[in-house]
Image (cartoon, helix red, strand yellow):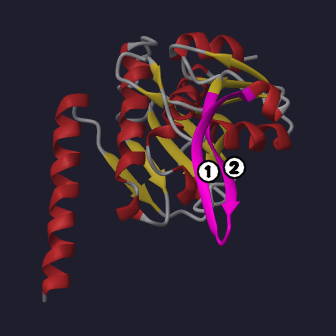
Amino acid sequence: MKRFIGVMFLLILFFINAFFLGTMMGNTNVIYVYADDPLVYGDLEAASFASILVPAVDESDNGVVTLLSVQAINGAGTGKILVNIDRIFFWGDTQDSIRTAHYVAENVRGLDLSNIDLVYTITANASVIEGPSAGAALAAATITAVENRTINKTVMITGAISSDGSITQVGGVLAKANASKQQGAELFLVPPGQSTEKQERLDCNWVGWVEYCDVRYETINVSQEAGIEVKEVKNINEALNYLLL
């Protein structure tokens, strides 16, 4: 009984959060769909597509890459957001990032999305990008799909997205840079101040049967450590200068 009450409490908090975010971002609803291939949703002749590789960190703190695709259905839509996922209740932060990406496309980039439906599909190990760290990638893919542009596959990005279009700090930048390098990227875009990263080092010595360790922190250069060019970008428009072909 206690477990049931706890689950219900968490669900209530989830929907309250969604309500207030929706109020802030407008009346845009996020609808979950389970099509076998959501990229055939709607009229393909009236649709444009964008896909972007998103670096993330898995539960073991390893860098991984997953594919995010966005389909923009032009003309006949009503401004809906549809998301193809398989774990709804673990995706509160991701839903927030999608709403913010939609808001940024309209209010920062100046795009009219009132008659465009957007379908988001996250493939591979999708659970690793829950949270805000894919926000910049979500915004970039949204704008690219609506503008019918193409993303440069040799450029990858990490960073949260704010409603004013600014890109803010996230964790695991070095692990994501390593994953981007392994994926074949040549340029990795990061939030301001994150081209370097502090890492914890332990200096340990044995005195008899007792090991004593001192903790110290080193500032590493992400570009040198991962072997990939790293550039700081402060907002989505600056990031798009590098992401778009």
| Residue 57, disc | 1
Determine whether the residue tagged by mark 1 lies in a helix, strand or loop: strand
Q: Is residue 217 magenta?
A: yes
Which part of the image, by quadrant, shows the C terminus?
A: top right
Q: Which residues are magenta?
A: 197-222
Q: Identify which residue is drawn at 72% across, 36% down.
A: 177
Mark 2, other Cα within 10 Å: few <14 / some 14–19 / many ≥20: many
In primary-sequence order, the first of circles 1 and 2 is 1
Residue 208 figure quarter:
bottom right
| Residue 63, disc | 2
Residue 43 location in percent, x, y? 56, 42
Q: Is residue 170 magenta?
A: no
Residue type highlighted by circle 2: Gly
On the question of residue 115 being in view, the answer is no
* Count of number-bearing discs: 2
Residue 18 location in percent, x, y? 23, 47
Residue 65 location in percent, x, y? 70, 48
Q: Identify which residue is drawn at 81% across, 26% down.
A: 224
Residue 148 higher or lower than 173, as above or below:
above
Residue 238 higher or lower than 168, as above or below:
above
Residue 14 located left or right of residue 159: left
